[in-house]
Amino acid sequence: QVQLVESGGGLVQPGGSLRLSCVASGSVASIFVMGWYRQTPGKRRELVASLVNGGVTNYGDSVKGRFTISRDNAENTVYLQMNSLKPEDTAIYYCHTRATIAPYTYWGQGTQVTVSS
């Protein structure tokens, strides 16, 4: 099993920045993808960014050029640096991993990001 704990959400003005963190614990050696999704009421959860072991990254179209995902393997932590934030980035952000042990997909509890003046 893998446990995920997010932090770093909050209220920020448009154009501002935030950095989200997600610490993984448990069977961390089984993890091969870490990433972030977000969800707003009435909408499906959407990919924000993902990072595969070895360094391959993938970003949602709406955040390309503004958000950066990175990982500290020594700390079992994945980060999401969010710059040039827009009101439409307001959502609950969930940390996500894929691992080689059941149930193979894990989610954090979510952290609220609100972009508003």
Image: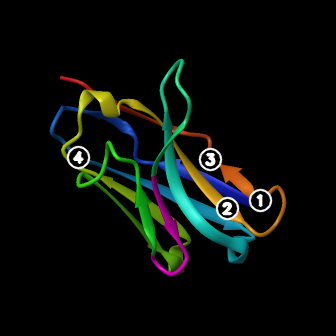
Q: Is residue 33 above or below residue 113?
A: below
Q: Earlier in the sequence, mark 3 or mark 4?
A: 4
Q: Is the residue marked by circle 2 packed among few (<14), some (14-19), or many (20+) residues within 10 Å?
A: some
Tell us which disc is closer to us: 2 or 4: 2
Badge 4: few (under 14), some or many (20 or more) residues near its Cα, within 10 Å? some
Amino acid at the residue labelled 4 = Ser
Marks 2/3: CA distance?
A: 12 Å
- Circle nearer the viewer, 3 or 1: 1
Under circle 3, the secondary element is loop
Q: Residue 64 location, x and y as percent?
A: 29, 52
> Which residue, given by chain and number where applicable, does mark 2 sit on?
98
User: Which x, y percent locates residue 67?
Assistant: 30, 53
Q: Which amino acid, mark 2?
A: Arg
Q: Quadrant of the C terminus?
A: top left
- Residue 85 sits in which quadrant? top left
Q: What span is in magenta?
A: 49-55
- Residue 83 in percent (x, y) is at 22, 49
For marks 1 and 2, the one nearer the N-term is 2
Q: Which of the 4 quarters of the picture holds residue 21?
A: bottom left
Contact (Cβ within 8 Å) of mark 3 with mark 1: no
What is the distance, in whole Å, between disc 1 and disc 2 at their CAs?
6 Å
- The answer to whether 20 is drawn above or below residue 110 in the figure is below
Residue ID for mark 1: 104
Q: Along the polypeptide, which appears first: circle 1 or circle 4?
A: 4
The label number, if any, that marks residue 17 in the structure image:
4
Residue position marked by numbered label 3 in the rendering: 108
For marks 2 and 3, the one nearer the N-term is 2
Magenta segment includes 16: no
